[in-house]
Amino acid sequence: MENKIAFVVPTKDREKDLRLMLSSLVCQTRIPDQIIVVDGSDPDIKFVINEFHELPIDYVREFPPSLSKQRNAGIEKLHSDITLAGYLDDDIVLESDAVENMLAFWGEADTGYGAAAFCITNAKSPAGTRIKQLFCLDSPERGKVLPSGWVSQLFCSESPESGKVLPPGWVSTSGNSNQIIDVDWLCGGVTVWRREVVDNYPYDEWFQGTGFMEDVDFSFNVRKKYKLTLVANAKVADYPHPILPERYILLGKWQIVNRLYFVRKYSDRGLSITKAWLSSFSVILLNLTLGLIRADSNRFRCALGNILGIGIALTDKNRRIGGHLK
C-alpha cells in the first residue's frame, strides 16, 4: 500500500516564515496529502493559508499558543487514510525532492522504524562542543541522550571534501546518498512518524510555550519501542529567529527545570537524577566561563536563569514554566 503523508505545522506570529515554508511545499516533486496549520498567532494569520489553494491545507486555531499543545491539536485532525505524520516548524524550507525522498525511505523501511527526520543541511556545529564534553554535557557521537539528560546534537555535512572522515554520527548529504543513521532522539520540527506512533504517543503538555526539550521527551519515549533515524537525502534548511536577549534568562531556567523533569520521568531508562543535578551546576560554570571568554552577556543571563531554575527545582519540582524565546 502506498503511504500517504501529512504534516502538522504549528505557527505563532510568523507570517513571512510560514509563507516561505508553504511555498517550498508547493514546489515539491511529491505534494503532501494533508497539511494542518495550527495557528497560535495574535492576531491570527489565516489569510496566509488562503494564498495556497494548490495545497491541501486544514486550518486549526489554537490559542493561547504552546508548542506541545499545538502539535497535539494538529494530530487530532489527521485524515483516516494518512499513514505517515510529520511535524514541521514554520521556519523550515524543504528542498524540492525532500518529501519524495522521505517517502522513498518509508517505502523500504522495516516495521522497527518509528520515525525518520529530514536532514538539516545548513546547521552548524555549535561552538563550545569540546568544552561541553569536558563538563559531560555533550558527546562526540551525534544524536545520543546522556545519563544526565543532556543530548548530543544532530548534524549533516554538506559535500565533504574528498577523502575526509566525518565525525561519528555526522551524515553526508553529498550526491544521491540514502545513508541513514539511527539515533536516540530527533528534532521535533523536521520529523516524520508512523501513524501508529502519533496515535499512541501524544506530546507531553507539561512542556509549555516554546517547549524546550519537548522533542527530546517525545522521541526518547518512542525510542523505547521503535528505531529512530535520520535520512541524509531528504534535505531541508532551517532559518530560526535569534533568541531575544532578555529571554536567555528563561532559557537558563528551562535548562535546569525541564531537564530535571525529563530525567525523573525516564529514570528507569538509564537516566540519572544525580548526574542531572551535577550537570545543573556544571552548566552554570560553563555559561559563566563562556561568558567571560567571549564577553557574551547572554551567557551571563543564561547563568542567572540556571541559578533561578535550581531554586525552582528545589522548592517545587513539578512547577511548569511557560514563555517564548523568540
Image: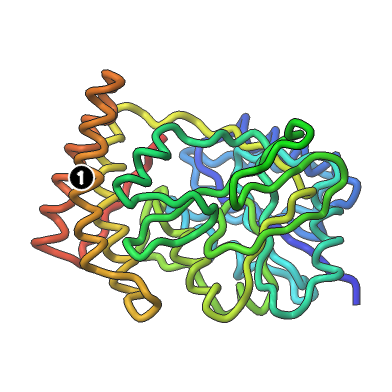
Report whether 301 appears left or right of 22: left
Dot 1 crowding, Cα within 10 Å, few <14, some 14–19, many 20+:
many
- Which residue is more in the foreground, 130 or 310? 130
| Tag 1: amino acid | Asn
- Name which residue lies at 24% across and 68% down: 273
Q: How many marks?
A: 1
- Which residue is more in the foreground, 90 or 177? 177
Decide if residue 78 is in sight here: yes
Q: Is label 1 in a helix, a strand or a loop?
A: helix
In the rendered view of the protein, which quadrant contains the N terminus? bottom right
Report whether 197 appears left or right of 32: left
Q: Position of residue 163 (x, y in %)?
A: 76, 37
Q: Position of residue 310 (x, y in %)?
A: 15, 53
**Image color mode:** rainbow
Q: Position of residue 98 (x, y in %)?
A: 80, 48
Q: Position of residue 320 (x, y in %)?
A: 26, 59
Decide if residue 64 is in sight here: no
- Name which residue lies at 14% across and 45% down: 307
| Location of residue 175 (image quadrant) | top right
Report whether 265 appears left or right of 55: left
- Name which residue lies at 61% across and 77% down: 226
| Location of residue 272 (image quadrant) | bottom left
Mark 1 highlights which residue? 306
- Name which residue lies at 32% across and 76% down: 267
Location of residue 153 with respect to 229 vertically, above or below: above
- Which residue is more in the foreground, 141 or 49? 141
In the rendered view of the protein, which quadrant contains the C terminus? top left
